[in-house]
Amino acid sequence: MRILLIEDEPEMASVLKTALERQDFIVDRTATLADAEIMAKVGTHDAIVLDRRLPDGEGLDLIPRLRAMNVDTPVIALAGINDRVVGLNAGADDYMVKPFATEELVARLRALHRRQFTLRADRIEVGRLIYDFRDREALVDDKALDLPRRERLVLETLIRRPGRAVMRRTLEEAVYSLDDEIGSNALDAHISRLRRKLEEAAAGIEIRAIRNIGYLLRTLP
C-alpha cells in the first residue's frame, strides 16, 4: 500500500514515516501543499495522510482541488479535536486527532484499503502457492515462506494479476518510495531471490521476464 504523507513538522513526519514503513507501507513524504498536489496527480497512492497546518496554507484546501482533477484517493486528515467536523465536511474520508497512536493510523489506513477492494479475495491461490493478504503470508502446503519485505511486496503485486504481465514501473512503485535510491538491477535482484525461494518450495509457479515490459507470474505447465 502506497501512502502520500503530507506533514511539515520534521519530527512528526519522521515518526510516522518510520512507523508506516515498518508495517510494509511505501511512503512518499512532502511538507507543502504545492508539492503535494503535484505528487497526488502523478502518483499512484492508495491513501493520503494530510496535516492541516502547512506552511503554504490550509491542508484541507487540497481535497476539493484533487477531486476537481478526478483524483479520488481517500484522505485521512490530521489536526486538533475541535477541527474534526470541519475536516469531515471538507471531504476527508477519515479524521484523526493529534496526538494519536501510530497503530491506530495503520489500522485506519488498512480499513480504507479494504473498503476500496472489498471485491478482492483475501487469499489467492496460484499453483501450490496460497497468498493470504490479511496475514501477509505466502504458504506452500501450509508452510510459510520466509520473505523479506520487498520480496513480499513484489509477490503481492504479481499474484494480483496471475498470467498477466506487470510493468516494471508498477512493480517499482509497489516496492520503493520516492526517497529510495534504486539501483539499476535492484528490482531484478529481489525477483531473483523470490524465484529461488518459490522453486525451492516447489510452489508450482514461475516468474518470467517479459522483455521491455516487466514480469509475469504464472502456473508451471
Image: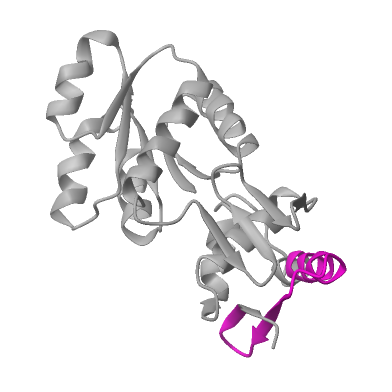
Q: Position of residue 40 (x, y in %)?
A: 34, 52
213 part of magenta stretch: yes
Q: Is residue 165 above or below residue 114?
A: below
Magenta stretch in the rendered image: 190-216
Task: Decide if residue 152 is on the left or right side of residue 110.
Answer: right
Task: Decide if residue 107 is on the left or right side of residue 48.
Answer: right
> Measuring 84% from the left and 69% from the top, which residue is drawn there?
196
> Measuring 44% from the left and 14% from the top, which residue is drawn there?
100
Task: Decide if residue 4 is on the left or right side of residue 141.
Answer: left
> Measuring 53% from the left and 71% from the top, which residue is drawn there?
169
Q: Quadrant of residue 129?
A: bottom right
Q: 131 and 186: which one is in front?
A: 131
Q: Is residue 196 above or below residue 105?
A: below
Work out whether residue 26 can be spotted.
Answer: yes
Q: Quadrant of residue 89?
A: top left
Q: Position of residue 81 (x, y in %)?
A: 27, 9
200 part of magenta stretch: yes
Total numbered circles: 0
> Measuring 59% from the left and 64% from the top, which residue is drawn there?
125
Please state, as top left, top right, bottom left or bottom right, where the C terminus lies in the image.
bottom right
Q: Position of residue 212 (x, y in %)?
A: 59, 88
